[in-house]
Image (cartoon, rainbow, N blue to C red):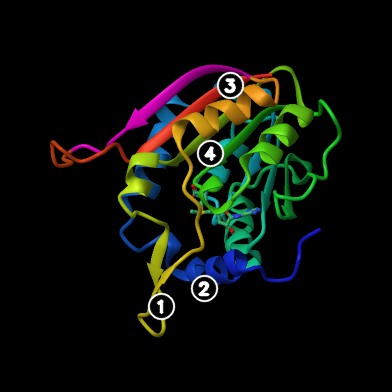
């Protein structure tokens, strides 16, 4: 279950209306990298963490044998549900859960082949419980894929933010800085085997700009 309206949920409820349309290079690069370099999903049961408005959910849903998409913002998730409905997939193919991923996940042990989290761990202070839950729900041999705002960008002050659609107020969503070693060590401590790290930047970026995204693939 979800605690009613955490500050992060409230912020994303406000952002939902413009999340897909306002310019956002991090969002766009994340979509591109997942599709080009993300794990092979076909035939797998996949859990998506922080699915948001469904930018990646539709892509995951059309490849996975079953997708569970979890988020704590009702407004973001409603948009994802509408998007997935347009695909006309069988009803039991995709489930949406309103859930705070800092709480125990409502899934059985060893029940999914893949856990995918894109641009969500920035909003989670403690990484260890999240990686422990991933290790718990993954089947042996299963894959965890994480894609996040690059720690170097965070260190320079970057943080998820948006302009409120009505007031124009710039809102910075509560966020926590994580280093590469924090991600890697949280995975190792949970018993996962880190397989590949990635650092990505969009075409046309300034030559001295830091990478925009950090990705990690780990195996149970
Ligand atoms: C930047 S959006 C990313 C959405 C989507 N993954 C994407 O790449 O476009 C972050 C999402 O994570 C969700 N989120 C943040 N903290 C969360 C938490 N503790 N539990 C579940 N979802 C969370 C937010 O509600 C939001 O929808």
Left or right, 196 with reference to 155: right
Counting residues from the N terminus, which is met first, the one under dot 3 or under dot 2? Answer: 2
- For mark 1, give the secondary structure: loop
- Contact flag, marks 1 and 2 (Cβ < 8 Å): yes
Quarter placement of the N terminus? bottom right
- 199 above or below 163? above
Q: Quadrant of residue 219?
A: top right
In this orientation, which residue lies closer to the viewer: 122 or 71? Answer: 122
Question: How far apart in space, not on screen, are marks 1 and 3 (Cα)?
Answer: 38 Å
Residue lying farthest right?
A: 108
**Which residue is painted at 14% across and 41% down in the image?**
206
Which numbered circle lies on residue 165?
1
In this orientation, which residue lies closer to the viewer: 179 or 195? Answer: 179
Q: Can residue 150 be spotted in the picture?
A: no
Which numbered circle lies on residue 59?
4
Q: Which residue is mark 3?
A: 218
Q: Which residue is mark 2?
A: 14
Q: Quadrant of residue 112?
A: top right
> In this rendering, which labeled residue sits more in front, label 3 or label 4?
3
- 24 above or below 196? below
Question: How far apart in space, not on screen, are marks 2 and 4 (Cα)?
Answer: 24 Å
**Which residue is painted at 53% across and 32% down in the image?**
183
| Residue extent of the magenta highlight | 193-203
């Amino acid at each position: 279950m979800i605690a009613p309206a955490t500050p992060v949920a409230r912020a994303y409820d406000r952002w939902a209306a413009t999340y897909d349309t306002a310019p956002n290079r991090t969002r766009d690069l994340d979509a591109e990298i997942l599709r080009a370099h993300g794990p092979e999903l076909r035939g797998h049961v996949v859990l998506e963490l922080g699915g948001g408005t469904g930018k990646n959910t539709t892509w995951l849903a059309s490849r996975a044998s079953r997708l569970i998409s979890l988020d704590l913002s009702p407004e973001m998730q409603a948009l994802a549900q509408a998007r997935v409905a347009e695909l006309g997939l069988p009803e039991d193919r995709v489930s949406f859960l309103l859930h705070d991923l800092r709480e125990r996940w409502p899934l059985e042990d060893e029940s999914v082949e893949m856990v995918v989290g894109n641009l969500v761990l920035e909003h989670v202070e403690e990484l260890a419980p999240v990686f422990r839950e991933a290790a718990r729900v993954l089947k042996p041999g299963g894959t965890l894929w994480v894609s996040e705002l690059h720690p170097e960008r965070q260190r320079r002050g970057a943080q998820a933010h948006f302009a409120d659609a009505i007031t124009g107020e710039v809102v910075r969503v509560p966020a926590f800085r994580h280093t590469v070693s924090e991600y890697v060590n949280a995975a190792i401590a949970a018993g996962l085997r880190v397989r590949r790290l990635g650092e990505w930047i969009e075409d046309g970026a300034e030559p001295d700009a830091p990478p925009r995204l950090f990705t990690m693939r780990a195996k149970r």
